[in-house]
Image (cartoon, rainbow, N blue to C red):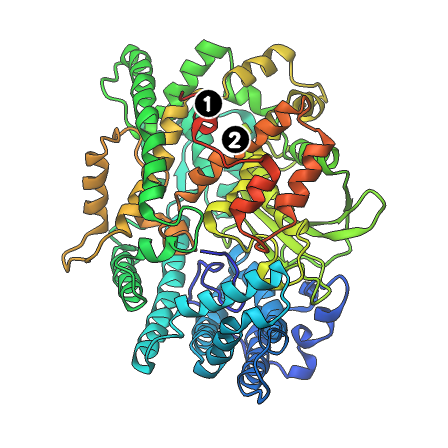
Amino acid sequence: MRLARFAAISLIAMTTTLAHPGFAQPQQAVPASSNPLLGDWIDQPQGVPPYGQINAAHYQPALEVALQEARQEINALSRVRSRPTFENTIEGLERSGQKLSRINSAFSTVSSADATPEIQAVEQAIVPLLTQFNSEKMLNPELFARIAAVHRDQAEFDLTPEQARLLNDTYEDFVRAGAALTPEQRAQVAAINTEMANLQVEFGQKLLADQRAGSVILSEAEVAGLPADQKAAAAQAAQAAGEQGYLIAATRPAIEPFLTVATDRAARERVFRAFDNRGANENANNTSAIIKRMLELRLQRANLLGSETHAEFTLQDSMAKTPEAAMDLLMQIYRPALARAREEQADLAVLAQADGIDRIEPWDWRFYSEKVRQERFSLEESELKQYFPLDGMLAAMMETTERLYGIKFVERPDLPAYADGVRAWEIQEADATPIGLFFGDFFARDTKRPGAWMNAMRSQSGLLGNLPIVVNNTNYTRPGPGERALISLDDAETLFHEFGHALHGLFSDVRYPSQSGTSVSRDFVELPSQLHEHWISEPSILRAHAKNAAGEPIPEAMLQSLLESRTFNQGYLTVQQISSAILDMRLHLMTDVPASFDPIAWETEQLAALEVPEAIGMRHRLPHFSHIFAGGYSAGYYAYSWAETMDADAYKAFEEAGDVFDPATAARLRTEILSRGNSRDPAESYIAFRGRLPTPDALLENRGLN
């Protein structure tokens, strides 16, 4: 489904936290006259929330004021006496709720990245209010009648292609939300939406709580094998938590480096299990009951709206169109990946047997895979990371983007940020014309949700005269005192990936906010991000920015080995990703949720049927699969692979031009894809850029699986 169509007032896709007993309650509301969120910042050219003046007590009263105003605007639109037209109905809808959208975006940015107990308590109070308003709006019979009239009579209006698409999408969005149902059915849909919103937030809260509880404290002996920078960061994390020893957080950027180099097998097992069992532990944070209930509600809603399954309902509004098409692509990738993974496992077993280990376990794979890589490519992860400082990779990202699109990054330390360490830049054209603002929040904190993501504080819109403001979040480990922040090549790919999303928002050049930037189907939105990843492997970029603490560039032999190893271990990585996507799709193809349904037992059965080796498993187990239970990717995780068929093929356009920084190809990419948002069909946009649609061949070649 499209990412932001009429969902700006919903916290469902953004938030992952919810207050529970023992959390702080919302602070006493402050008068509107002294509430900085109700000031004039929204109408300013910069439009950055005044975070330096905002505290948790300001959000709920500001959102309640904005909700009242938005409700009045929708009621006024619904009761216009004149004949429904595109201007007084569709454009009116686009103009409505702007204060609510902006204040909610300001809050959502904080609630996902710095969810203190006070912010969580506010979230608990406002999510039901926002969900109720969303349902009122999308299920308003008078408003829908006007939209339906414009849709019916559209041939009588002189609409541009962009306007015609907006009209048709708006009509379909309201239909898919249940606006065409009977009053009783609309009430059912509204109740389902409210319960699902609360469950999604509760899922995220339980996951964050279990992640915190999953931090592992290790002794000096248990961190044997860790390089000095990792040990220093782990020691600092333990000290910050009031502990002695070394703390390994239950986050991917923390555990994967540990599992790669730690020589103590028992310690690797402890760390892996703490991460892998998030949401599956027998404690108050177990997510199984939430998963079961969410599946029931999604299926009920799909049935009410005329679909047999949630997957069928979701994919109607996608490039894939049907679950069958998505599953067909997934299996085309999965089969060769599984064959390659079995070969990789056999290689690991040889080394493990030399250490007296007869069975490769999940906590062994990365450790022995690193040994195979060292042997095959003369690469050692701890040595390689010395050439990947975060600041250097940021510079690499900026140079890449500047060379492709001719833009400039101007750091803006004067702009207010919502947390310590958040940095801001103004993005400009070569002639210094502002494009938008970019905020980067790169380090993990206890109050930040797991993973990496992009969100918009403000979407571009010609109608409203808004330039975009976008945010990238990652969860890199904060370095110890006086140490450089070192990241892996995979982390650097994530940095480039998220900035690809940011470019999609920054380069948006459309009239209507609902069509802006990343407001596209799930299986198209990952194209710009995954395409941008390719340039982190460009030798000229790495030679310029991959440098050690002495400022020495990465040795040429190491660079060449690194490039040669890019498809190493791809069987393992691909099986992890594709198995997650397959289970997501199968889960949402269920036509009935049995009363005895156990998500963990079901997951085990499905992985066995797919013959996924236990040493590999899924990238995201169901108990902590926040993409599909606390975000918007339910029946949509396949989108990463669907988009990869395009990004691998799209990068070939640069290679075929003879220069991966070819300005003409980059300009065409910006014009035909990055600037278009959802103003036209994504397939049309891709064909306009590439001349045709892609096949999986380039994807398999990109992963070395052909």
Question: What is the x, y in percent for residue 365?
Answer: 35, 24
Residue 648, numbered label: 2
Residue furthest to the right: 431
Q: Residues within 10 Å of mark 1 (few under 14, many from 20)?
A: few
- Image: 354 above or below 597: above
From the viewer's side, name the closer residue of 77 and 597.
77
> Residue at 43% of width from left, 67% of height from top?
23
Q: Secondary structure at mark 2?
A: helix
Identity of the amino acid at label 2? Answer: Ala
Identity of the amino acid at label 1? Answer: Glu
Question: What is the x, y in percent for residue 597?
Answer: 17, 54
Question: What is the x, y in percent for residue 13?
Answer: 46, 59
Q: Is residue 422 visible?
A: no
Q: In screen coordinates, is 90 left or right of 21?
A: right
Q: Is residue 2 visible?
A: yes
Q: Are marks 1 and 2 in contact (CB under 8 Å)?
A: yes
> Residue at 55% of width from left, 44% of height from top?
474
> Residue at 61% of width from left, 42% of height from top?
499
> Residue at 36% of width from left, 48% of height from top?
625
Residue 312, numbered label: none
Q: Residues within 10 Å of mark 2 (few under 14, many from 20)?
A: many
Spatial CA span between label 1 and label 2:
8 Å
Quarter in which the C terminus is drawn: top left
Residue 101 appears in which quarter of the rendering?
Answer: bottom right
Mark 1 or 2 closer to N-term? Answer: 2
Residue furthest to the front: 156
- Image: 650 above or below 571: below
Residue furthest to the bottom: 81
Residue 701, numbered label: 1
- Image: 132 above or below 431: below
Quarter in which the N terminus is drawn: bottom left
Q: Secondary structure at mark 1?
A: helix
